[in-house]
Structure formats: structure tokens, C-alpha cells
Amino acid sequence: QVQLVESGGGSVEAGGSLRLSCELSGVGYSMHCVGWYRQAEGKEREGVATLDSDGSATYADSVKGRFTIRRDKASNMLYLQMTRLRPEDSAMYYCMADRGYYCAPDRTTSSVDYWGKGTQVTVS
């Protein structure tokens, strides 16, 4: 049974940093893509960063150079290190896992197999 649990959100001042974590329970080799999406109030959910089974990371243009996605397979954890945070980064951040081979932040949200419940990030 796949269960994704996010943590690490909070409030931070602009320019600050946060690290989000996601427990990837039950995520095995059949999941070819893991990643982070976010949804700001009143907006569509959008991809932030994804990591495929070969370890290749892809980032949304808005976060390139500021965010880093990393997976620790030994502990089955996924991380999103966020630096130089901006007010427009404020959103609920969701961890995802998917069996599909196409792995990029522009992947349609409706096709994603599994989602966590999210963790809130607020930048002021």
C-alpha cells in the first residue's frame, strides 16, 4: 500500500530556506517518477520538481537554481531543499509518486497515481 506523508513546511521570510520531506511508504520499483507539486490558493496545482527512476531531476523554470530534489532510497525518503524563497513560492506542497515513464513537472496532475496530503509553505 502506497502512502506518502509530507513534513517540513512552515513560515519563513523571503530569502530564507526550508527543507520538505516526504515518506515514500510502499513506493517500490514500479514507481518510475516521484516529485513535488504545489498549489497556491485559488490556483491550479503545478509541478515543481520531479525525479525519475534513473535519478534524473527536472525542475519548473520558476524554481531552477533555487530548489533541489533528492531521494534517499535507503530510508525511502524524498526531499525538496528550497532556498532563496519568494512570496510567490507560498503554497501547499504535495509529494507524488507515479508509475508512468514520463516524469516532468508538466505532467498532468489528473494522471498522477498517488498524492500525499500536503504541507503548507508560507513566505512573507
Image (cartoon, helix red, strand yellow):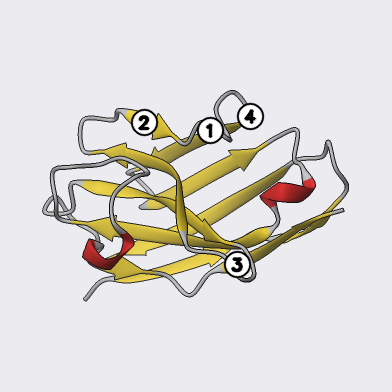
Q: Residue at 52% of width from left, 65% of height from top?
A: 6
Front label number (1 vs 4) = 4
Q: What residue is drawn where x is 42% and y is 70%?
A: 116
Q: Secondary structure at mark 1?
A: strand
Q: Eyeballing the image, is 2 above or below 83?
A: below
Residue at 48% x, 62% y: name it: 94
Q: Amino acid at mark 1?
A: Thr
Q: Are marks 2 and 1 in contact (CB under 8 Å)?
A: yes
Residue 96, given in percent of the width and then of the height, sits at: 36, 59
Q: Position of residue 3 (x, y in %)?
A: 33, 73
Res 55 → quadrant: top left
Q: Where is residue 120? Give x, y as percent.
A: 66, 66
Q: Are marks 1 and 4 in contact (CB under 8 Å)?
A: no
Q: Earlier in the sequence, mark 3 or mark 2?
A: 2
Neighbor class of circle 4 (other Cα within 10 Å; few <14, some 14-19, many 20+) is: few
The residue wearing badge 3 is 119
Mark on residue 66?
4
In whole angstroms, how far apart are the C-alphas of marks 3 and 2? 21 Å
Mark 3, secondary structure of its residue:
strand
When asked about the image quadrant of residue 52, the answer is top left
> What is the spatial separation of the Cα atoms under label 4 and label 3, in whole angstroms?
19 Å
Task: Specify few, some or many for label 3: CA neighbours under 10 Å numbering under 14, 14-19, or 20 or more.
Answer: many
Q: Amino acid at mark 4?
A: Arg
Whichever of callouts 2 and 1 sits on the residue coming sooner in the sequence is 2
What amino acid type should be assigned to the residue bearing mark 2? Ala
Q: Which residue is mark 1?
A: 68
Residue that carries the numbered disc 2 in the rendered image: 57
